[in-house]
Amino acid sequence: MTRTYSPLFDLSALPSLRSRIQGRVFVPGDDGYEQASLTWETVTFKQRPPIVVVPAGDADVLNTVRFAREYQMPVAVQGGGHGHPFLMEALEREQALLLNFASMKNILIDPQRATARVEPGVKWSELIPLAHQHGLAPLNGFAGDVGVSGYLLGGGFGWLVRQYGLGAGSICSLQVVTADGQSLRVDAHTNADLFWGMRGGGANLGIATSIEFALYPVKEVFGGQVIYPIEQSRQVIAAYMQWAKSVPETLTSTFRIMQFPPLPGIPPVLQGKAAVIIVGCYNGSEADGTALFHPMRTLGQPLLDTFAQLPYSQVGAISNDPVDAPPWHFYNDHTTLRDFSTEQIDALVVVAADPASGLFEVEMRHLGGVLARIPEHEMAASLRDVNFSLYALAAAPTTELLAAGRQSVERIMEATPSDTSVPVLLNALAFNDVGPERTRAAYTPDNYRRLVALKNSYDPQNMFRFNNNIPPSP
Ligand SMILES: Cc1cc2nc3c(=O)[nH]c(=O)nc-3n(C[C@H](O)[C@H](O)[C@H](O)COP(=O)(O)OP(=O)(O)OC[C@H]3O[C@@H](n4cnc5c(N)ncnc54)[C@H](O)[C@@H]3O)c2cc1C
């Protein structure tokens, strides 16, 4: 295979890179290259970086960045591999070096301080059971297989968001390798400007080689899904919108409209069907949880009801997201709103419930709670005035077949135009091929200006640009 490298790099420089690295270095054709280049979507997405480094520790990351500087190569970073694959297609074109953290998986729990310190290859499903042994829980998202580092640095909203806030807000300190080849301790007192920016804009400002974050005293939760036939969607959603406004901050919930594929593994009653689903999690006793969710579980005859008291170690079962990426091509979009009108809900149901829409899932998450009391300037990510997040996902076995689903996602977004006065969530944009303007929408104007100033000082050449990018000032 013919391959081009940066003007300063050719394969004769490889031994120099390898001599500086304890971990592994791969170029196309090497045994292990394919594995080291994998993202979460192994079937429908392939990235072809000219060089992949799988670092063994902090020193490898530092040496890789210094090497990339020498050879003027941009650096892409992969934690759990669940984020924006489309941008990663540019790795080959732009002759980037990929740092894949698959081997950096150390976890240290401090039960006295209720904190965890993790290396950037750790996934939530690896950390949650260890924290649970001490009666503690992190602010993880719905899917256990997502990487801790990408999730936390991009904001992160999960089942405890209305009680404890965004995942980024739980970060206590980081070790960060910057584009100028330094390794910095970053916390509220040391490099405080970078600490502010890493919590929500992190992928743009440096590489986190470890992240320390708070854990919370949550042992058990009451959670699950109640699934109704699609014909009931208007009634269920109308009842949900009223109910969600009355629940305590200790309860976080979402409604979904899903088109279930006719595949084994899906309960027979749902195979090939569309349905409306209330999914929720309450941090409290089974008795209180049962009472709180009662109005949502008695809206008719559910197709399925999985609500139960669960140890937090099984929190992933609530949403039941797939561990392996389905072998499909995806298109998604996301917006945030202060409120939904009845007309918007009607329009959403018309598209989402149509079997010909090519849609896979529409999900509306209820936010608010403590988020509304966290000052907008506390960190880069802020969802202070956001009450609802809407996410629509189309899936199809080929890119050609995805066209119908893509149109449906666009119709849904037209029916519920973004409230431009509130930011979107960076993590929810991650699948799409989004440009800097869309990234900008994830921040309040003041916070975005501050992030650009940080980018100008920490990464003026935009070495870290394979992300939802905040370009430095021209
Ligand atoms: C099935 C599924 C469910 C999800 N559920 C939720 C949810 O409930 N809540 C939510 O908030 N999000 C959710 N997400 C979105 C997810 O949080 C983001 O895609 C997140 O960025 C993934 O992180 P990662 O480390 O796995 O991905 P990666 O693709 O490895 O990284 C994502 C981004 O972070 C950067 N990055 C990763 N590690 C580092 C590091 N150490 N230093 C600097 N930059 C780094 C990468 O360069 C990239 O830009 C979900 C995604 C999927 C696919």
Image (cartoon, rainbow, N blue to C red):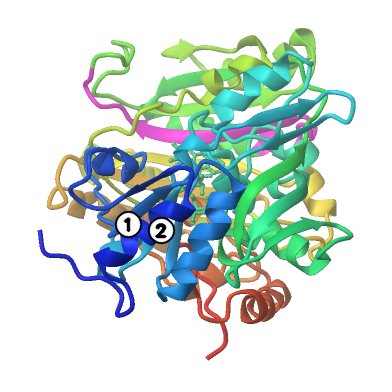
Q: Residue at x 14, y 45 (%)?
A: 398
Q: Secondary structure at mark 1?
A: strand
Query: Is residue 109 rendered to the left or right of residue 436?
Result: right
Query: Is residue 130 rendered to the left or right of residue 102?
Result: right
Residue 75 in the image, given as x and y percentages of width and height: 44, 64
Q: What's the mark number on residue 445? A: none
Q: Could one spot residue 84 in this view of the protein?
A: no
Q: Secondary structure at mark 2?
A: helix
Hey, what amino acid is under mark 2?
Leu
The one of 108 and 254 positioned closer to us in this rendering: 108
Residue 250 in the image, given as x and y percentages of width and height: 78, 30
- N-term-proximal mark, 1 vs 2: 2
Number of numbered tags placed on the structure image: 2
Residue linked to disc 1:
51
Residue 350 in the image, given as x and y percentages of width and height: 35, 45
The reply to whether callout 1 and callout 2 are in contact (CB within 8 Å) is yes
Q: Which segment is the magenta one? A: 242-263
Pointer 1 local density, CA inside 10 Å: few below 14, some 14–19, many at least 20: many
Q: Nearer the viewer, mark 1 or mark 2?
A: 2
Residue linked to disc 2:
17
Pointer 2 local density, CA inside 10 Å: few below 14, some 14–19, many at least 20: some
Q: Residue at x 45, y 38 (%)?
A: 102
Q: Could one spot residue 469 in this view of the protein?
A: yes
Hey, what amino acid is under mark 1?
Ile
Residue 443 among those drawn in magenta: no
The one of 122 and 53 positioned closer to us in this rendering: 53
Question: Compared with residue 398, is residue 239 higher up or lower down, i.e. above or below?
Answer: above
